Amino acid sequence: MAYKINALIVDDDDHVRGFLVVLIRRLLEGVVFEARHGQEAIEIYKAEKPDLVLLDVNMPHMNGLDALRQIRALNPDAVIIMLTSLATRRIVEDAADLGACNFIRKDTPKSQILEVITNTIEEHLVPQTEATQS
């Protein structure tokens, strides 16, 4: 399935961001925006209003939890998946309390990353968008 939605991928590491762009393009027909840090993510979110956000926790200028808080203030229904290299229980709980829909560790195999993204899209976005066969 290819979903007609736009996404924003936020990560300060160019390689990680590029990897995620390649992965998510397997699932989406929409535009994939990229940001290097939380402040840039807020600006892109305001301008483009993507349907899905993949948001790194640890970044310079503004961390992912602060960006999550601000995006959810702009749109309480924003669909956001948090990304991290180090998933402590506290970070996961804080992200969930702030409204993150899901959480992915960066060392997760790509098939499982795709599964988490697909499940999140189907749970939170499919009723609002059309999915087409690819």
Image (spheres, helix red, strand yellow):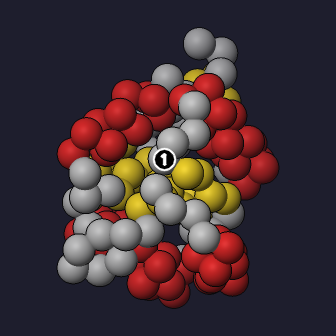
Residue 67 lies, with reference to residue 12, above or below; the image says below
Left-right relation of 34 to 110: left
Left or right: where 127 falls relative to 20: right
What's the residue type where badge 1 is placed?
Lys
> Dividing the image into 4 quarters, which one contains the C terminus?
top right
- Residue labelled with disc 1: 106
Residue 118: % across, % down: 67, 37
Q: Position of residue 58 (x, y in %)?
A: 37, 69
Name the residue: 42% across, 62% down: 56
Residue at the outermost top position: 134
Which is nearer the eye, 83 or 107?
107
Residue 68 shows in the view:
yes
Say above or below: 95 vs 33. below
Q: Secondary structure at mark 1?
A: loop
Which of the 4 image quadrants contains residue 43? bottom left
Q: Tell me what residue is drawn at x 35 percent, y 57 percent.
A: 10
Q: Nearer the viewer, residue 56 or 45?
A: 56
Which image quarter is the N terminus in?
A: top right
Residue visible at 67% across and 63% down? 101
Question: Which quadrant would residue 110 be assigned to in this image?
Answer: top right
Q: Is residue 104 left or right of residue 18?
A: right
Number of numbered labels in the structure image: 1
In the image, what residue occupies the spot 25% across and 58% down? 12
Q: Looking at the picture, how far across and down is residue 72, in whole percent?
A: 54, 80
Quick check: can you spot residue 51? no
Q: Where 71 falls versus 127 (above or below)?
A: below
Dot 1: within a 10 Å radius of its alpha carbon, few (fewer than 14), some, or many (20 or more) residues?
some
